[in-house]
Amino acid sequence: MTLHIKHYLNLMIFLVHVFPGYCGDPLKIAFWNVENLFDLEDDKHTNDNEFIIGGKKGVTKEIYQQKLTNLSEVIDRLDADILGLCEIENRFVLEELNRAAIIRDYTIIHYDSPDNRGIDVALLVDSHTISVNSSLPITVVLPTGSLTRDILYVSGTKDGIVLHLFVNHWPSHYGGTERTIPFRAAAARTLREQVENILAKDPTAEIVVMGDLNDEPIDPSVKIHLGAHMETDSMGIAPYILWNAMGPWHRNPNGSTYKYAGTDMVFDHLIISAGLLDRKGLTLINGSVGVFDGQKYRQHGGKYDGYPFRFWAGKRVLGGYSDHMPIYLSLEKSE
């Protein structure tokens, strides 16, 4: 028996004794706002003119290709089994991005949303690690009666266990924070209704909510209207039905997913149900929640020190990645 096989067997024995519930490979789930991934064609039904060739940003084929290359670098490094995305224009750019990434060949789940700018959410799934059962877009109606970006729902099965996934991109603060609070509250209530419907049928259902919620863990849309608390012992106590795994990163300069006016913020969330904390079925792996980070993915020096190294700065190409950092967690099957 070779030395490396002995090491492997010793590792497996160690895992069985130290983690008796350990079964098979972990399932890594990630989310990323990729900052305005538009194609070069004018869509007459959306406001995408600034990103087309001849538009005010001065986009060229080379700039578009650089954007794809930079994003695919991070996606390959994330190496997630399931990857939620937002700020993507259409299925075409998702297919382009999937071709640019080399580590995985994802199944793309995407629906066109009624967003004025034409940006959508999507889920990329490695069908070798989890099978997709069903998917549908969930309409979000704002208090004004207008529509915003859909919430994407996907049901999948991993090792015989059903996993419910929701991908979100709630309304931004554009037009003023106070004015737009009801918009994010509407998205939160829409999502909560879907989660409660699942939990009414199965109180131990395994649910992952991901997305750029444009609010922080302490804001009413997330904490009250959705019911996602930062303390696990508050779950099940009204109004809390979910746990926000990004809570520990709140106001953490080493883990902010977004930065505005010099403040470290968590706008990007991974939120889970109690069914992923009960050591039955699929279970969150302790210490697996994180923010994908690194020196090259942040700006350094000057006014924007510590900010995510974004691709665009107004009309100027910085040549970075996104104005948001990716986030991730891992699940494993318990006995």
Image (cartoon, rainbow, N blue to C red):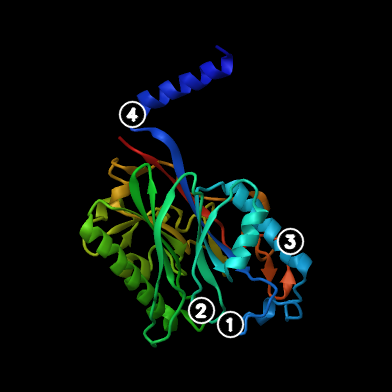
Label 3 sits on a secondary structure element that is helix
Residue at mark 2: 115
Q: Given contact means CB atoms under 8 Å apart, are the residues at marks 2 and 1 in contact?
A: yes
Alpha carbon distance from label 4 to label 1:
53 Å
Label 4 sits on a secondary structure element that is loop
Q: Quadrant of the C terminus?
A: top left
Residue 171 position (above or below residue 311): below
Q: Residues within 10 Å of mark 4 (few under 14, many from 20)?
A: few
Residue at mark 1: 46
Residue at mark 3: 66
Q: Kindly identify the amino acid type of the residue bearing the numbered disc 1.
A: Thr
Alpha carbon distance from label 4 to label 2:
47 Å
At horizontal 38% and vertical 73% (from top left) the residue drawn is 187
Residue 71 location (% of width, % of height): 64, 57
Alpha carbon distance from label 2 to label 3:
25 Å
Q: Residues within 10 Å of mark 2 (few under 14, many from 20)?
A: some
Q: Earlier in the sequence, mark 4 or mark 1?
A: 4
> Based on the displayed image, in which of its 4 quarters is residue 138 positioned?
bottom left
- Residue closest to the eye, 207 or 41: 41
Residue at mark 4: 20
Q: Kindly identify the amino acid type of the residue bearing the numbered disc 2.
A: Asp
Tell which tag, 4 or 2, sits nearer the viewer: 2
At horizontal 61% and vertical 56% (from top left) the residue drawn is 98
Question: Which label is found at residue 191?
Answer: none
Q: Earlier in the sequence, mark 3 or mark 4?
A: 4
Label 2 sits on a secondary structure element that is loop
Residue most toward the bottom?
A: 144
